[in-house]
Amino acid sequence: MAVYKGKVEGMITIPTGGVQALTCTDASGGPTAITIDAGTYYWSTADSDTEDFLAQLSEDINAAMTETWTLTLSADESGTGKLTIGCTGATCTITWQDTNVRDLCGFAGNSSGATSYTGTKHVKALWLPDGPPRSAYGLSDAGADEMDQTTTESSAGHVMTLGYQRRTAQWIEWQGISRAKTRISGESTTGESWQQFVRDVIYAEATYCPGRCLRVYPDAGTDATSTEYRVSGAIPEPEPLIDGWIEQWRIRIPRLLKVP
């Protein structure tokens, strides 16, 4: 039986009016300005409330260009977290107009002279753990039911309970996470660590990340299955699996509330 590590994505919001993110040039012309449509996105999955950021960016580029452009994010169980942008059969040029979108996409600068380019950094708003998760019912289950209730007892022994609203709560712990995936100081690829993800997404330090809005995927290679949560409370510091050994860690999110 395969052991899946899953992945965690942070919400990306493009404000009203959209963002002129980059200009593209290919064999048929350019540079052509590309504006990303306003909306609420995650990297991988579309549903009735949010859209696939990768698909939206691809759609916006191809709506403006004549040649066919392709965008591929390595975000499966063995993914690198890097985005590749290319133009099929044609040398292309990418010039970033919005450096925040550039950083979000994991690129360090402009690109020219080839048919495709892969970012040198891990995209923001994505964390790919390299150890297995643990939760009360497994990540395919959204979590435990909770309800706010008030209970009264009469002197005769009668009991009355008023229930108000039900919610679904989850906790997740990943075990055996490498230092590279845990701490910024240990990163092999810039931006791949949990520490950086927490700063960017949960603390909302990255532009276009509204904070505390996550999607959790039980299988990083299956984008159709995920649960959307909000982080409640503080995120504890990672703990070493063995006291004093800094190469493997335990990372925990103690309280997540499923979005109704």
Image: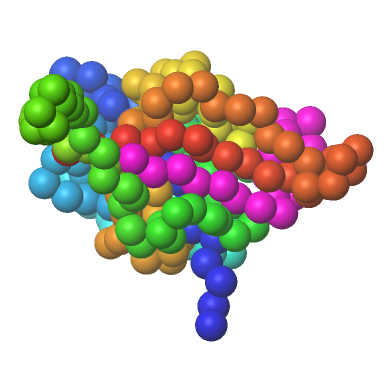
In this rendering, the answer to whether 101 lies above or below 175 is above
- Name the spot of residue 69 as percent of width and height, x first: 33, 54
Residue 249 shown left or right of residue 236 in the figure: right
- Name the spot of residue 90 as percent of width and height, x first: 41, 58
Question: Toward which corner of the image does residue 149 lie, by quadrant?
Answer: top left
Scheme of colours in the image: rainbow
Residue 217 shown left or right of residue 84 in the figure: left
Residue 109 shown left or right of residue 71 in the figure: right
Give the residues in magenta: 169-190
- Which residue is located at x 58 percent, y 40 percent? 252
- Name the spot of residue 258 as percent of width and height, x first: 28, 40
Q: Nearer the viewer, residue 76 or 163?
A: 163
- Which residue is located at x 79 percent, y 31 percent? 185
- Which residue is located at x 85 percent, y 47 percent? 242
Residue 179 shown left or right of residue 160 in the figure: right
In this rendering, the answer to whether 201 lies above or below 91 is above
- Name the spot of residue 29 as percent of width and height, x first: 30, 43
Count of all numbered marks drawn on residues in the image: 0
Taking the view exactly as shown, the residue that stands out farthest to the right is 244
Question: Is residue 150 visible to us here?
Answer: yes
Residue 90 inside the magenta-drawn segment: no
Taking the view exactly as shown, the residue that stands out farthest to the front is 156
Question: Toward which corner of the image does residue 35 lie, by quadrant?
Answer: top left
Residue 180 inside the magenta-drawn segment: yes
